[in-house]
Amino acid sequence: MISRVLSAELAQHAGQRVTIAGWVHRRRHLKSVSFLVVRDRSGLAQAVTDLPDLPTEESVVEVTGTVEVNSRAPGGVELVRPEIEVVSAPAEAPPFDLYRPVVTASLPTVLDHAPVTLRHPRLRAPLEISAASVAGFRQALDRLGFTEIHTPKIVASATESGANVFGIDYFGRPAYLAQSPQFYKQAMVGVFERVYEVGPVFRAEPHDTVRHLAQYTSLDAELGFVRDHRDVMAVLREAVAGMLESVRARASHAVELLGAALPEVPAEIPAVHFSEAQRLTGESEPDLSPAQERWLSEWALREHGSEFLFVTGYPMAKRPFYTHPDPDRPGYTNGFDLLFRGLELVTGGQRLHRYDDYVRALAERGESLEPYEGYLQAFRYGMPPHGGFALGLERWTARLTGAANIRQTTAFPRDLHRLSP
Amino acid sequence: MISRVLSAELAQHAGQRVTIAGWVHRRRHLKSVSFLVVRDRSGLAQAVTDLPDLPTEESVVEVTGTVEVNSRAPGGVELVRPEIEVVSAPAEAPPFDLYRPVVTASLPTVLDHAPVTLRHPRLRAPLEISAASVAGFRQALDRLGFTEIHTPKIVASATESGANVFGIDYFGRPAYLAQSPQFYKQAMVGVFERVYEVGPVFRAEPHDTVRHLAQYTSLDAELGFVRDHRDVMAVLREAVAGMLESVRARASHAVELLGAALPEVPAEIPAVHFSEAQRLTGESEPDLSPAQERWLSEWALREHGSEFLFVTGYPMAKRPFYTHPDPDRPGYTNGFDLLFRGLELVTGGQRLHRYDDYVRALAERGESLEPYEGYLQAFRYGMPPHGGFALGLERWTARLTGAANIRQTTAFPRDLHRLSP
């Protein structure tokens, strides 16, 4: 490995002659002196020199210099008497200045040039928060005895929602990209009791909105031996708390850079029944509108001091056929959503677990059993009461960072129009 | 949550009355007494009863009983005076007895019934080893300052190998399933210096073999600021050691059940140059045959006491265009394979990092620049010397467990013929 010190470690080497390596983030020429700011994965470091010709921005350089304390330099130290070696020169200048505090280019321009624009500290910050979140999700569920699974992304039938699936030519046969690991994670409850998967899901979303992607990363969990959906909600609470704990531990610099305010997760997240949510908002539609979700989030913050709110008991009519009904309230389910800062972040619930109940549920919806046969297999052989949830990683990161568009939270978004880079 | 004790924890409750929950693994009726063996995620537990009617195999049950020490029972304890409650009865008997030590059904039958056959302790064991391996991979790379990324699985052009890609209808436009995150992980070296991704990759593999899948899980890593491929090999060594450490810590029961022998990873894995490998095996083809790989693995074990062997310096003609040439040996590259127990497990190497070198490499292969434009973007703006590797998770698990067919190492395999469950 190139022998180097990371910029964040420079202060530990005051007085020593060391080498740093990274990209030229910025050159600044003053009257009698010049500054070369170098960016590496840990941050920025400054070298002070009287050399007239400095390598251009985005050159890859190794800079050897003596570490000197200077309270006005980034990190409180700078390199003096530097020797600068260009390791790799750029073929052209970046499409815009990566050293400016804020990128003013339009989002399409930024996305078209993702391999270089993501080098901007503010544009890469959401990806650091995203990576830390996933690590925390896994850690929280590992602690609770979950097993990680990997399930097929190519499936035989477009069963789960029927619409918005991508078709594939599978060795001459029609097949589809999986919209979720729903059926597989349920089957795996029969094997491991508690499973999670972090992986891509695909939606042929025909609408061009700021909150939909054609591919996103879904954090899925499913667990057996629950009493009902409340046990699933308790696990989800632990997962979300673990994600935030990890963001604090692993991505504090990114959080600070974006000025993101991290929420507290109450020991018990407040929950309101769907019918009560309707009463509070004075509406009677069988689903909650975006305006109602926003209102409810504000209400939860006001009444319970919580940025998270569970809405439980969604009506049967609005939930998928595998949702477990509420045994005490006909027409309602043991399905829930988790609202976070005005938006639905997670959908989950208890599922049916008896084979006969599945057969009945499909018949009631006028659906044929046949395309579901692979799915129903698991339920023929004894399945415990179980439930789970799915959290969209990009939506989570967008809410956390205040990103206006979900495309700012993933490196190379896919949507109705965008298929590259 | 259902209040329960896991079977593996029973011994800590000797003398107490507790409840376990799980599946009826087996009923055994002797002359005056019956045994009910219950399976949960932690293992097996036995209840002793004189009840004549016991719930059938794969019934989900809660069993409350008094824990009594019995050295002949699994785990050294059993439940006596049990009360048995059936939580969920199976609709039919499993296609074969899950309690027999070995499954004798044919592999296609086993795979057709995966949601139930994976409940067999020996059939689920490879998935436990697989999950532990992935956790160890991430942990090792996290320690080395890597950042996890998630890249597009839908791409605009079938560039990397040209063949064996699945076509998609992407909103009416042709697109393809990604065969690897190669180009994306290289671009992200420009952002985070060190990145990894664990995710599905897709190969429209037209051959029906015991070692190919149409979807598999690829463990990819890429890092910048390397001197050459040897720095990549050193990181790969750490990743593999971390995987094995995690398997030992998290899946020892599965390892024991399968009688798998875990290899030691030498502090430095022995390496042999491709030309030397040819000399040793007495061949002169521009690639290594499966027979040569086996021979070299045996040689490494004999000469170096290592089940791992690096073969370095593969000829240009057999490596992709982005491979960095060996500056000292024309015609050879800084590309390597890692052989493990007779088979190529990992492919990796140093990559080109200068834009002009890419333009030249493509021209030399008679390829047009145009489909690579998105890929080459990252290299226009200064990229450090870098390299990386890709390890196929299922192939790793197969080698580790001695599975004869790679389909035994993933829950729901996809191949030329198989698209469900």
Image (tube, coloured by chain):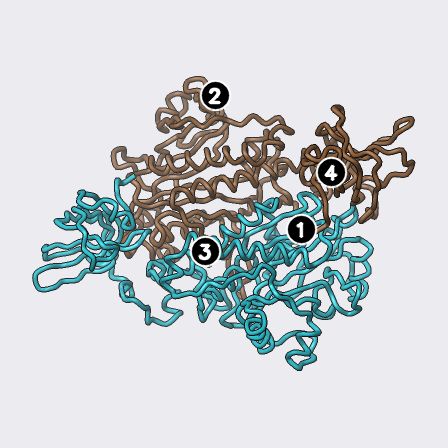
Chain colours: A cyan, B brown
Residue A292, image x, y percentages: 60, 77
Both on one chain, marks 2 and 1? no
Look at the numbered disc 3 and give the secondary structure of its residue.
Answer: helix
- Dividing the picture into quarters, in which one does residue B167 lie? bottom right
Vertical placement of residue B110 versus A314, above or below:
above
Residue where numbered disc 3 is placed? A247
Q: CA distance from mark 1 to mark 4?
A: 16 Å
Point out the residue furthest to the front here: B15
Look at the numbered disc 1 and give the secondary structure of its residue.
Answer: strand
Amino acid carrying mark 4 in the image: Arg
Residue where numbered disc 1 is placed? A223
Is any atom of residue B97 visible in this view? Answer: no
Residue where numbered disc 2 is placed? B298
Residue A401, image x, y percentages: 44, 65
Using the image, tell me which numbered label, if any, was put on residue B248. none
Mark 1 falls within which chain?
A
Is any atom of residue B70 visible in this view? Answer: yes
Point out the residue furthest to the bottom here: A282
Q: Is B112 left, or right, of A216 in this rendering? A: right
Amino acid carrying mark 1 in the image: Leu
Disc 3 packing (10 Å; few <14; some 14–19; many ≥20)? many
Q: Nearer the viewer, residue B124 or B70?
A: B70
